[in-house]
Amino acid sequence: MTAVFLGVRHHSPACARLVERTIDELRPAHVLVEGPAEMNPRLDELLLGHELPVAVFSHYRDGRRAATSWAPLCDYSPEWVALRAGRAAGAEVRFIDLPAWHPAFAERTNRYADAEVRYARATERLCEQFAVDSPDALWDRLFEAEPDEGVAERLDAYFALVRGDAEADAGDRAREAYMASWVRAAVAAADGGPVLVVTGGFHQPALRRLAASGGPEAVRDAAPGVEHDAVRGVELGTAPGVDLDAVRGMALGTAPGVDLDAAPGVELGADGWPLVPEPPSGADAGSFLVPYSFRRLDAFAGYESGMPSPGFYQEVWERGPQEAADRLLRAVVERLRARKVPVSTADLVAARSLTEGLTALRGHPRTARIDVLDGLAGALITDDLDGPLPWTVRGAIRAGTHPVVVEILAACGGARTGRLHPGTPAPPLVHDVAAQLDRLGLSGDPARAPRLDLTDPGDLERSRALHGLRVLGVPGYERTAGPAHGVDPVFTERWEPRPADGRDAALVEAGAYGATLAEAAAAVLAERAREETDAGALAAALFDTVLCGVSGLSAHLLSELGARVGVLTQPGPLGEVLSAALGLWRHDRVFGVARDPLLAAVIGGATDRLLWLLEGARGPGGVDLPRLRAVVAVRDALRHAPGVSGLDRSAAAAVARRVGRDAGAPFDVRGAAFGLHHVLADPAWAADGTADAVRAVALSGVEALGDWLAGLFAVARDEVTAGVRTNGVGASEGGTGDGARPVPEGAGSLVGVLDDVLCGLPESAFLAGLPALRQAFAFFPPRERERIASQLLARRGLRGSSRALLRTTADPLLIARAGALEDRVTGLLARYGLDRHGIGGTPS
Amino acid sequence: MTVRDETPAGPGVAGAGAPVQRPPAEVRYAGELAALRAGDRDPRPPGWELSLRAARRFVVGDPEAGISRKFVGNPSLVDRALVTLATSRGLMLVGEPGTAKSLLSELIAAAVSGDSTLTVQGGAATTEDQIKYGWNYALLVAEGPSTRSLVPAPMLRGMAEGRLVRFEEITRCPLEVQDSLLSLLSERVVAIPELPGADGMVFARQGFNVIATANTRDRGVNEMSAALKRRFNFETVFPIPDLDTELDLVEAEVARLLSGSGVQPPPDRDVLEVLVGTFRELRAGAGAKDGHGGGGDRSTAVMSTAEAVSVAHAVGVRGWYLRGEPGNASDVVACLAGTAAKDSPEDLARLRRYLEQQAGRRRTPQWQALYDARHLLDD
């Protein structure tokens, strides 16, 4: 009795070919595949004849947690090939892994993400050894570019090394124990016939050991008759200092703290096969087929992915590496020329010769993906780059990547999207949406235009459902009126649902994002948030989240939005995001998001980032109102959301203090920071340096003073006015009785100081600064301006209506200009002796 | 024509007796090069002293064969650079100052041609004479133009001898001087109209190519003419991506420099970590959450690994000679003021802002010490 273990990398054409070959040679009675075991009764569904990529989408919800995950399959997935070819060869094909809802998969959303990436030490060492940049390049070099002979042995050696270095987590161990029980059952059932086990290579060494330990069955290696230690010595043993026996011992021996022989918790059914765990009672769980796309499969586009560049590997799978390389070259050039990037024939020659040269230099028997990529980049980019080429590092592509690189990656990624066979049961989302619309009374007469009152709970629920559909891009749902942002005082919405082509198809497609409307919307919004770099779009995503009512659903969405605001560079738009979020966090009664953790994350992140940006603010004079509003938003966040993490009042006050004193900062920012510091650290305005500060700023000119005051009033008008009331009035009424030392002057003195400064100005300087000053005082409502005016009258010992001072019959600038004209006329008259004094003084 | 015979085996040997401060790569690594040459079985491009693979091993290292790793960076960059040089395009290395572009070009020239001294140093005053050829005017007046009175510059020699020519800081040359490379790179011939007959045309031999370097700070490659750009493949050299690698490199270099300066205690790894961490964040644009693309927040001063080494050296010297102990975080702050700021008040402000808002949040003792010493910036 034998079991053959094939350890594969998910989405690897080389591994897929190996699986196909092995099935062909072995003609196994049973093929066991890493995949959700609960799908076993429905394997026929998988083989209906879909256009790949498709994914097994699993969802789970109980009182405590909700999770969704995917197991994506494409034409060249080893798992897919095992299903397809195994079935064709007449074998019994089964998935043998735990269901996706099992706690072993907590934190994971992609079943076929690279497990070994989480254990990077060994791959790092191998990269160094083979002098390549990244694990993906290493993989290409060791497996994809190599001929198929001996690939099984190299895979074994590779994964033994990777596994040997890593300590599998509890989730991995539980899954391995479960899979091993299937292997034992299959070996028993095969009764001497061969059994093929296709799993992720990371699990393979442990699985082999576990399966053997559970019973007396003989377990042999993938390639009979090959001496494994010798292979290892040849292929990977070149690394000095790697004790291969030790590695092997570790890999196949016991991981610390695990009793491998126990294989806990796997019960066998009456037929001898392991039971598939049932979800706990009361929980809602299920698995469905959904269409998937290369874009979501691509490691450059997303997180937790498998191999990058699915489009390229599809070509490799279909047409072989050489033609794939040629077609990639052509695709990239076509894309670039379509974008009007000049690509000359000479560039093509250079790209081609570079690619071939690299293939030869690296000793690849055939052109590998990285050779093509490197060749294209070397020949087509004639600029300095801002960041390393994305394929030399692992992870998603960054914003601001060179356009040529972006096109190269897009061509590699491919645009293919899967399509399900029409006979496939619809994903749960379709049913969920239909049920919801039905329940909410939205599925009836499509011509009716629902007017929704958002303060009505029923209507709010309707609005959320409709917004969810809108966010998912399901055609036919258009809002024609409603609140545009978080603090928009509009409480009604008007929608026009109408029949639209492709609505059902779009829903099936959207079914890949979640089982319920809310879950799917949250997943789409998280994706949007990850891709947006613009503050406006980010704010829109944030508000859409609120509109859909899904903010509490996705921790991922939460962290994504919080992190995204941390990289915005313009204070103005960032301030708007902050104040909108803060407004909702504090006051929202409509959408039910007050004190929402998502908004708190945005508030914390945005405040932090704004403080950082403010301290670096530079630029010309003048008043930048959006930036001042951003400071106001910071003030409000610190004042009204003190419990939010990331907000530190004293640190913020220290920043404000420094900015206020920073001679290089624009005056409006300095004024605002001065105000912010006092609001935060000194609300009573006690130890007041306002007068000194005003005098100091006035030295830089009236315009600077105007800007400074605008900043101050924008942020701390209330506090300044409070000072006018308490100190100003209090001082005049109570007096001090101590002539030597006046009242410790509060902000009330601000008016006095300003009055002194302005009265001391020459007419021309005053006129020059007047617009800036007017702008500053525009922050006061008329009532407060009147109070200031009466103070001015009092200072001069005049009696009269302070209101009259504020009411001008014409534009003040015009009056000022008239005054200037009068001055000039007076001057001229005096010069020619025609003034009253002159005329009067001249005896006739 | 014949160009002046024999290159000297390197300035290191020329001035016999007096030790040379820094011998060229082919002298420093003469042993490794000889070993590689002896064991080289792979095909060599015409005119090359080593095969591509051996040249690659020379640069990225091969511990088994006793070849040290000389360039810390993406190995694929070295691959692309070498293959480019074997084709008809020149190689343009661009990047921030201090990213070891010149070192890489020196190593490659030493490996490929066995000689890294054919170098044109670009600058505002560079003329065509210094690139192609000039004249010995005494001989020119006495004998008229001849191969004897001709003074070949690196390009002419590289072409005649089939060697790699290095053109450092090419973007600092005036544009018209840069463009004098055009015909040379496409036609691969230099005409010397003053010389009669066959001597008047010098054709490039196999093995000739150009490695140019340009830094993105002084004057980027944007101004370079499209015609010239087309004749080069561009490779951007990045600062060391990995903190640990950079830290190791800085530590090794600083330890060497400090012992050279008579400082006894080796540098404190924790202090170096704070220093290198600060450099990396200012380089990437501090304040950005993921350490990337902080918008306009990037320091305009050069925050290269080389600069980190020199600051760490200064830190060690300061600590030892002022107090008789290893340099600490306050020395770092004091020395940073001179580097990170140089002459730009904006950079100083940026550094101050970094210390105030970012450094203080790290809870390790050395970061806290750095934060506590921030007032030293103002002194």
Image (cartoon, coloured by chain):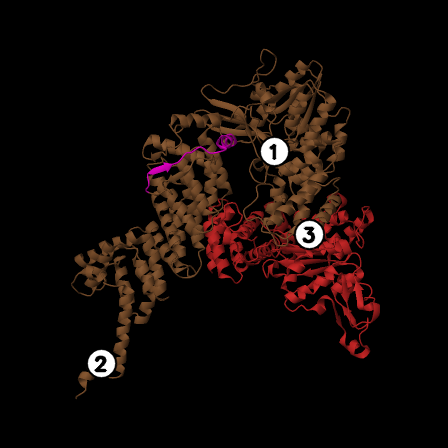
Chain colours: A brown, B red
Label 3 chain ID: A
Q: Is residue B304 left or right of residue A191?
A: left
- Membership of A503 in magenta stretch: yes
Whether residue A821 is visible: yes
Q: What is the x, y in percent for residue A620?
A: 43, 61
Label 2 CA crowd tier, 10 Å (few <14, some 14–19, many 20+)? some
Foreground of the two, A731 or B327: A731
Helix, strand or loop at mark 2: loop
Range covered by the magenta-colored residues: A489-510
Mark 2 vs mark 3: tell me if same chain: yes
Q: Look at label 2 and name its amino acid.
A: Asp
Q: Look at label 1 and name its amino acid.
A: Asp
Helix, strand or loop at mark 3: helix
Do the residues bearing badges 3 and 1 touch, measured as CB atoms within 8 Å?
A: no
Q: Which residue is mark 2?
A: A835
Q: Is residue A501 above or below residue B37?
A: above
Task: Pick out the residue farthest to the top.
Answer: A270
